[in-house]
Image: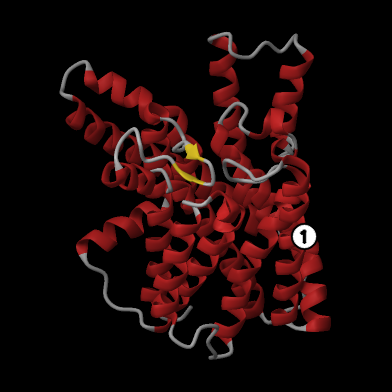
Amino acid sequence: MNDPSRVDRIDVLRGLAIVAVALYHAVGASTGWDLPWDGWVRDTAALGLPRTLGLHLVLQGWIGVPLFFVLSGFCIHYGFLRSNRPFDPADFFRRRFWRIYPAYAVALLAAVAYQIRTHVLNLSVPADQWQVLSHLLLLQNLTPSTLYGIVSAFWSIAVEFQLYLLYPLLLRLRTRFGIANTLAATAVLSLIAKSFLIGIDGLPDRIPPVGVQGLISHWFDWTLGAWVAERFITGKRVFQYPTVAAWGWLAAAFLSTWFKPLLVLSFSLFAIGFAALLEALLQKPTPLTLPTRCLSFIGLISYSLYLWHQPLQTRLHALFNRAVPSPAAWFLGTLTLIAIGWLLYRLIEVPATRHGRRSIT
């Protein structure tokens, strides 16, 4: 994108995504990951409606993941379209591997070493061997026993990499049927996959879906970003009034998390809202303020933060809480986590990404 402020907006959205996810994991670890159900609606009896709504809002921090998927689909497809070259699978997968896997592998092996040391994992046990192997192969999202294993946030890294594998197929479908029809096809596949899951397990209590069905469901969310990219590069719009659409879809998505029959749609509803928000920011980029500059910096290092925030944030809080009160401990722990994220971004992400570019023949 020729306008640097548009690039900044992408990083602002990444920053919002990682802040939401980190807050979700920090609060969820102490309060529980979700509010209970009273039949088909959320139970408000224990806390009362105002407190229940407030806590429920914080516990929707997982919505950073659909935002990441939309941004990924946009950036990958926009980069391909702007290159104006035929798609080279070897080039594409080499770049994606070096961009994603080295930083992921370091974080994963550090978590495995810690869990072996604390006797959470025992590599002489076949189930734990498969737990580690499935994570190394980025297959942990395919079975319930490994979905949230080792570091629960890593399930989305596996889905992201699998979506990269589907990108050549997406391009073939786009060439033959157009991006809009391809998006419609992924939407139909997503609904079929979600219906299949409901038919097997009944209405879900939580998000996300597991297995191949989950991957197919998230293909639509990722393709939304590609759709925005294609319309943007041709000077067209997906949404006539993107700001209004963003608020409307995000409000509908939040309401869907309150009713169990609609919960299975929540992830994709948020993705649609974020696609509209992305388009709104691309259409009218404005100079960054101090808060959005901070978010832009956090977005720049968001991948390292995503990989390390869950294992570190509660431990950093506990470390600082020995010397200062809890609010100050959280603040110091957050600053330390950001510093660690920046350091790992510079030491691992940047060199690995450069290597991926250099290794092109």
**Total marks placed:** 1
- Say whether residue 4 is left or right of residue 77: left
Q: Position of residue 333 (x, y in %)?
A: 28, 31
Q: What scheme was used to colour the molecule?
A: secondary structure
Q: Could you say whether the residue bearing mark 1 is in a helix, strand or loop?
A: helix
Does 323 appear above or below 342?
Answer: above
Residue at image position (32%, 57%) is 295
Q: Position of residue 184 (x, y in %)?
A: 72, 75
Res. 99 in view: yes
Residue identifier under label 1? 192
Q: Quadrant of the C terminus?
A: bottom right
Residue 336 versus residue 329: which sits nearer the camera?
329
Residue 27 versus residue 38: which sits nearer the camera?
38
Q: Position of residue 84 (x, y in %)?
A: 68, 82
Does 232 appear above or below 13?
Answer: below
Does 62 appear above or below 329?
Answer: below
> Please, which residue is most extreme toward the bottom here?
235
Q: Position of residue 193 (x, y in %)?
A: 76, 55
- The residue type indicated by label 1 comes to Ile
| Residue 55 picture quarter | top left
- Say whether residue 137 is left or right of residue 151: right
Residue at image position (56%, 33%) is 152
Residue 78 versus residue 182: which sits nearer the camera?
182
| Residue 345 picture quarter | top left
